[in-house]
Amino acid sequence: VVVVSLIQRLHVSPVIGYLAAGLLIGPSGLGAVSDPDGVGELAEFGVVFLLFTVGLELSLQRLWVMRRFVFGFGSAQVIVCGAAIGAVAWWCGMPVPAAIVIGGGLALSSTAVTLQLLVERGETASRFGRVTIAVLLLQDLAVVPLLVLVPLLGGDGASLATALGFAALKAVAALAVIVGLGRLVLRPLLRAAAAGRDTDLFAAVTLLIALGTAMVGLSLPLGAFLAGLLIAETEFRHQVEADIRSFKGLLLGLFFMTVGMSLDLQLLAAEWQTIGAMFVALLLGKTLLVALLGRLFGLNWSTALRSGLVLAEGGEFAFVLFSAALVAGVLTGFQSQLLLAVVVLTLATTPLLAAIGGRLGAHLGRIP
């Protein structure tokens, strides 16, 4: 509470506050929590509710209105940045599965931090803001297949294609069941809960929907995401979002704290040169790639460069992917530590990058 309050007074993202609080009370700090894994299972529900909220925000109408930049620019950003980062990781000696996870994880940006900056600067309705939000929406969508892919990459290479095929069939079948039952049951169920005017009952039904889709054979995060997509098409979307907000906020904060607890300060201090090189390479590489892609999609240099700067950081979903990769054996503990440190550093510098982008944008605004 104290650390996060101080961070917020400094107008820094709460994500940084949770990470700092976890680092402070973890084994590398005061040692108040000696076993971060003990709270890991509860903290994972933060990821579940985060993906549920992402599904709520991704209504089909919203995606259609912004389709050119969501599916065009956004897809190109994830694919090009992911491929470039993965290729560099492979060139540096990483195995192919690890390179895929690293490329996918570092290609994503922080939705929470970037949206907060856009709101604070009053730029959500500007062309720069709308383009940036479109890319973030596609990145949120890209998390789902990446989370499905990570456990499969932990198996042997010979069975990867077969495993991907079975996973795809399973996902399609589960999606058909969820959509079919959802359209028949979901809206009447929510209407019945709302008719009783019992807020506790409505919240309970919301939790049942968010967590119950895993019963058809999907993982909890993927099931929650699909449940959010279904509810987004109903008239109860905003009420559900309000009811779930406190659960998501508390449990997601706990997840970020467990990430902070897991950081090894001694290892990071010993590897500061490697971390620094990765930090600089990630920011420069993503900024350049996103800016060039923006130009290809018709943006002027001002908007393209500003989008590149605010999307250059790593994101909260990188923590999720790298934690899953560590469990699956795709990444080692040492590799995970280095990657988490790089993401934390880039998150901390995002406000500075946004300020630099604003000044550069003003100078470049007259260039077509």
Image: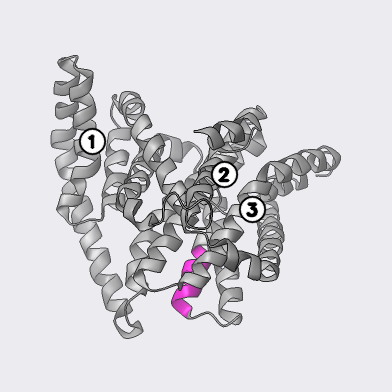
Query: Within the magenta stretch, is there residue 142?
Result: no
Mark 3 to mark 2: distance in Å? 11 Å
Which amino acid, by three-letter code, is at mark 3?
Thr
Query: Within the magenta stretch, is there residue 103?
Result: yes
Query: Label 3: few (<14), some or many (≥20) within 10 Å?
Result: many
Which amino acid, by three-letter code, is at mark 2?
Ile
Q: Which residue is mark 1?
A: 207
State whether residue 44 is above or below residue 247. below
What segment is highlighted magenta in the picture? 96-104
Position of residue 217 in the picture relative to residue 248 (left or right): left
Query: Label 2: few (<14), some or many (≥20) within 10 Å?
Result: many
Q: Which residue is mark 3?
A: 346
Mark 3 to mark 1: distance in Å? 34 Å
User: Where residue 38 sits in the image (x, y, percent)?
Assistant: 32, 54
Which amino acid, by three-letter code, is at mark 1?
Leu
Question: At numbered mark 1, what does the secondary structure look like: helix, strand or loop?
Answer: helix
Q: Which residue is mark 2?
A: 16
Q: How many marks?
A: 3
Mark 2 to mark 1: distance in Å? 28 Å
User: Where residue 93 sits in the image (x, y, percent)?
Assistant: 57, 83
User: Where residue 152 sits in the image (x, y, percent)?
Assistant: 32, 71
Q: Earlier in the sequence, mark 2 or mark 1?
A: 2
